[in-house]
Image (tube, grey):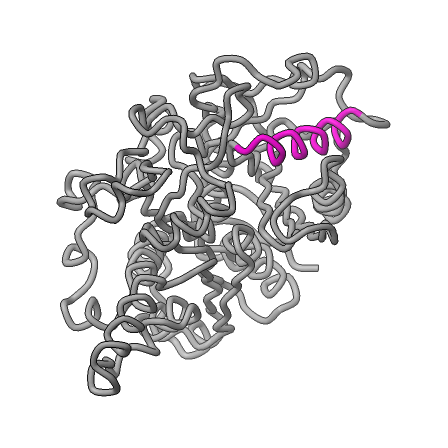
Amino acid sequence: MRRVVVTGLGAVTPLAAGIKQTWRRLLDSQSGIVSTITRGPQFVTLPSRVAGLVPLGSRDDGRWQAKDWLPASEERQMALFAQYAVASAHEALQDAGWHPTKDEDLEMTGVTLGSGIGNLDEAYSTSVAFDRGGYRKISPLFVPRLLINLAAGHVSMRYGFKGPNHAATTACTTGLHAIGDASRMIAFGDANVMVAGGAESCIHPLAIAGFARARSLSTDWNDDPTSSSRPFDRQRAGFVIGEGAGVVILEELEHAKARGANIYAEVKGYGLSSDAHHMTTPREDGQGPYLAMRSALRHSQIEPRDVDYVNAHATSTALGDASENKAVKRLLLEGNGKQKASDINISSTKGAVGHLLGAAGAVEAIFTILAIRDGIMPPTLNLDQPGDPSEYFNCNYVPKVAQEHAVNVALTNSFGFGGTNASLCVAKY
């Protein structure tokens, strides 16, 4: 089996447009979660009025405006989630120094980019326009801007990549599935280089209303947005919706070495599972996440005792965080695992950025890769008191402040509605 390494990173997040600024702000314990009430009257009436919004402004200041990344003609053709994906792919390709021109290189470079929900804004506004004005009110770009696979399509077209062109859409597991699937395409010889990740932009009243009706969102911290996302905390009360994109460049090891590429880390294993339990609620015993992590380590041929850090999916929901906590402790304490719970290092970066849905897994994989490179674990913000019960939440959750720690092997987890689970094992090369 061919080995797969990471050679480039790119991201647009609520902390910044650009991975360097995002990572710096994350390690400084800053938050990208803000109030949504300035976005229009419909947001004011919703029970959850906080979100992880990409900051607007100049690219030079680490902020987002489409014209800094895209010509006007392309901007009109793309949904916002696809714009975030294209911008992140551009940054990642620049970082990797991968600008192929030969046919054989273009044919062995592919793209796997997904989204959980995609362009909800367009679907909503076009439905209203059609209801009011009929056929002639529909834009000829409606369908291309709606399709989730168009993010991957736009990246492929922009750079002429003729390898696999694929889009995952598996709810909040999308970004990690995209990276894991891409790693296997390289391992099995379908490509030498893959542009992989996830993107999401659905901070829309309809989306927030839907998640709120499902009682999934944080509603207790509307007057204090930066305190609203509280993974593993006793007062956690729902997730905070976010937007953005994350993209990694994956590369076959010998290919990367031959061109002298910078190698961030190696993708060692990828595990998948299903809860087979409920549409939106995880199993309390954490069996699904456990099976995914166990599978990732089995493919990696790495023992649980050798895992230095887990980047948790933990979204700040009462049941979800508890379920994952059980799964991590079961995996890393059983058999030849860690000696005690306090030896387990686990954090959730959703305290800083919220839950980016289909982009979450990709952005969090990037944070995990950077933790390996820099020997530092990103913090879990707003963690005042772990629990409940506190005696079961007894791992090191890296509360509030980043911690220096050698990270040679890490797991990063993503789980989604429908009971779909994924875990990626990444290691120092």
User: Would you say 302 lies left or right of 75 here?
Assistant: right
Q: Residue at x 38, y 75 (%)?
A: 102
Q: Percent x, y for residue 360?
A: 47, 46
Q: Give above or below for 92 relative to 404.
A: below
Residue 254 horizontal/vertical position (percent): 56, 57
85 vs 100, nearest the viewer? 85
Vertical order, 417 against 61 (above or below): below
Image quadrant containing the N terminus: bottom right
Q: Which residue appears at 77% of the width and 34% of the height? A: 303
Looking at the image, residue 343 sits to the left or right of residue 412; the answer is: right
Q: Nearer the viewer, residue 66 or 179?
A: 66
Q: Is 41 in front, or is 8?
A: 41
Percent coordinates x, y for residue 345 in the rendering: 60, 22
Picture quadrant of residue 187: bottom right
Residue at figure coordinates x 76%, y 41% from the top left: 287
The residue most toward the bottom is 135
Q: Which quadrant of the structure image shows residue 228?
A: top left
Tally of numbered tags: 0
Q: Quadrant of the C terminus?
A: top right
Main secondary-structure element of the magenta-colored stretch: helix
Rendered view: 4 above or below 265: below
322 drawn magenta? yes
Q: Nearer the viewer, residue 212 or 301?
A: 212
Where does the magenta region start and end? Answer: 317-333
Residue 163 colored in magenta in the image: no
Q: Position of residue 356 (x, y in %)?
A: 42, 46
Vertical side of 378 occupied by 109: above or below: below
